[in-house]
Image (tube, rainbow, N blue to C red):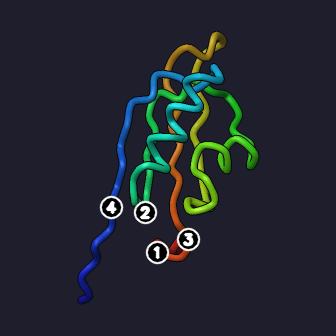
Amino acid sequence: MTSCNLEILCWNVRGPNQRARRDTVRETINGTSCHIACLQETKLNEIDRYTATYLGGYRLDEYVFKPAGGLSSTKGGMMLLWNSNQVGQR
């Protein structure tokens, strides 16, 4: 068994659907040395590669997301970003 020293950021972002909020998320992630970032309550139905790269920078180069629920998209949504050089996917 090997040891692993991963840094994980977990944050309820309360919807990065406005530019100022996205900028805050980006600055916070880039201000850390996290290998994984879990963003909760994204309140977004779709997250494309451009948005993922903007939020996670080039260091957190892979992502998956679960869309927000409901017609108004005011609840839920989750995004997981990670550094593919540090975290493997099976």
Q: Give how far across and how far down residue 87 sits, in percent.
A: 46, 72
Give how far apart the Cα atoms at labels 3 and 1 are: 5 Å
Residue type pointed to by label 1: Gln
Q: Which mark is residue 51?
A: none
Q: Give how far across and how far down residue 45 sits, in percent.
A: 67, 28
Residue type pointed to by label 2: His
According to the image, label 1 marks what residue? 86
Q: Residues within 10 Å of mark 2 (few under 14, many from 20)?
A: many
Question: What secondary structure is found at the residue carrying circle 2?
Answer: loop
Left or right of 89: which side holds 54? right
Give how far apart the Cα atoms at labels 1 and 4 are: 10 Å
Instruction: State which tag comes first along the sequence, 3 or 4.
Output: 4
Position of 83 relative to 46 (above/below): below
According to the image, label 3 marks what residue? 84
Left or right of 87: which side holds 65? right
Q: Residues within 10 Å of mark 3 (few under 14, many from 20)?
A: some
Q: Residues within 10 Å of mark 1 (few under 14, many from 20)?
A: few
Residue type pointed to by label 3: Ser
According to the image, label 2 marks what residue? 35
Q: Residue at x 36, y 49 (%)?
A: 9
According to the image, label 4 marks what residue? 7
Question: What secondary structure is found at the residue carrying circle 1?
Answer: loop
Q: Are marks 1 and 2 in contact (CB under 8 Å)?
A: yes
